[in-house]
Image (cartoon, rainbow, N blue to C red):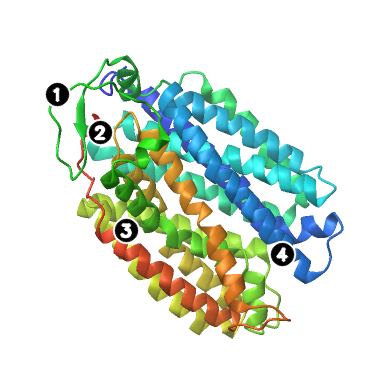
Amino acid sequence: MSQAAQTPTRVRLAVLVAALGYFVDLFDLVLFSILRVPSLKAIGVTDPDQITAIGKRLLDLQLLGMLLGGLAFGMLGDRFGRLKTLFGSILLYSVANILNAFVTDVWQYEILRFVAGFGLAGELGAGITLVAEILPTAKRGIGTTIVAVVGLCGAVAAGVAGKYLAWNHCYLLGGVMGLALLALRVGVSESGLYEKARSDAGGARSVEHGGERGARDAKPPIRRGNPLQLLWPPRRAWRFTLVILSGMPIWFVGGVMFVFAPELGRAMKLEEPIEPARVIFWAYVGVVLGDIASGVISQTIRSRKKTIIAFLVALSASIVLFFEVAPKGAWYFYAMMCLVGAATGYWAIFITTASEQFGTNLRATAATSAPNFVRAMAVPITSIWLWMKGTADVPGLDPLKATVWLGTICVVIGVLAAFQLDETFDRDLDFYEH
């Protein structure tokens, strides 16, 4: 079924399913940031240093699962279809999160956070790829922004649930919502561009990039969903690297400032302890507002690249402002988290750009892998942050200074990468990678 043959009802249903899938995805993804302390205490971990260390290990395993799951589900999305990948991902992470509610030991928690991360990896890339391919070029940014905004509301909902529900009930709620979403799979059509790629013997347009189009007369066999194609030729590997680095600062904020907000609050000597659920709630209120703004700005100025650069500059300014204002009190802290979250709100545009950078036969692989590589960057980023701030036995920088320095480095790298990205706002997605 081609883009033109998609009825408005089917298009709206596809956008709805992708959006609700991302809602449940984000609900489950941020739950661990909220439930880290109470869940570990419930299974017998009470020492604050152990809670930080084990929490870091659990986060690393979740992100490692997402990295591997991104590659696996991306490959499946290009080989077997966007829809099968979307619903398979939802099923896996839903079951894993239900089982998270029943952990009694750290090793069980480690296994299930890895499995949940593996499942969570597939939903966003498959959903965004599906929406990008079924919508007209001028409306792609609107559709993917809707998906991102609805999805990010899931993180806000997780903040509310984490405040008022027991930790294990939160995991149960997330898993049950995911299973309920599978009922919507009936009536959603596969992407017409994917169907065309599957049936073609060898060639729509090809690119080895810079925006130029290859000739239709050269028709080598089309390889679908081969992640090694992201590594060769070098220009394509560089393109994929630039995409990842342009989004990396988002997960400096998500992996350090959101997750370790209580530790930052203690370093600021705030009288009122910082509550993880409130941090997530206010931070993702900001992210939702930022994603709406980035979508509107991108459509208005007709540029993904300029929007990403503008938000990275805003992120740099918001981090500086955070450390000036947040020490004044807990509510200043939450308000500044909201501001920093808003400056990371180019996530929707980042995912859209990742899907637009690559041909139909590699699009799901790239669009699913890229955000999970970005998320996985939180593993070395948080490790560097913990090393920079040191421990009681091996003192390092003040935690606040470590955060400022590391955040500055991440943002500078992100800006340099974004400047080198191809502009994709008006790009026709009917091309292949050879």
Q: CA distance from mark 3 to mark 1?
A: 33 Å
Q: Determine whether 260 is above or below 237 in the image.
A: below
Of residue 230 and residue 297, the one placed in the foreground of this image is 230
Identity, as a three-letter code, of the amino acid under mark 3 = Ile
* Three-letter code for the amino acid on which mark 1 is drawn: Arg
Q: What residue is shown at x 66% (from left), y 85% (from top)?
A: 269
Residue 387 seen in the current view:
yes
For mark 1, give the secondary structure: loop
Q: Quadrant of residue 231?
A: top left
First along the sequence among labels 2 and 1: 1
Residue receiving disc 4: 53
Q: Which residue is mark 1?
A: 216
Q: Residues within 10 Å of mark 3 (few under 14, many from 20)?
A: many
Which numbered mark, 2 or 1, is in the foreground of this view? Answer: 1
How far separated are the C-alphas under marks 3 and 2? 20 Å
Nearest-to-viewer mark from 4 and 2: 4
Q: CA distance from mark 4 to mark 3?
A: 33 Å
Residue 338, horizontal then vertical, whole percent: 50, 66
The mark found on residue 429 in the picture is: 2
* SS at circle 3: helix
Question: Which label's residue is closer to the chain start, 3 or 1?
Answer: 1
Q: On the image, numbered disc 3 is attached to which residue?
A: 308
Is residue 129 placed above or below 269 in the rendered structure? above
Q: Which quarter of the image is occupied by the N terminus?
A: top left
Residue appearing at x 45%, y 21% in the figure: 80
The location of residue 265, given as percent across then percent down, is 64, 77
| Residue 160 appearing in the image | no
Q: Secondary structure at mark 2?
A: loop
Numbered mark located on residue 242 in the image: none
Disc 1 crowd, CA 10 A, few/some/many (<14, 14-19, 20+): few
Q: CA distance from mark 1 to mark 4?
A: 55 Å
The nearer-to-camera label among 3 and 1 is 1
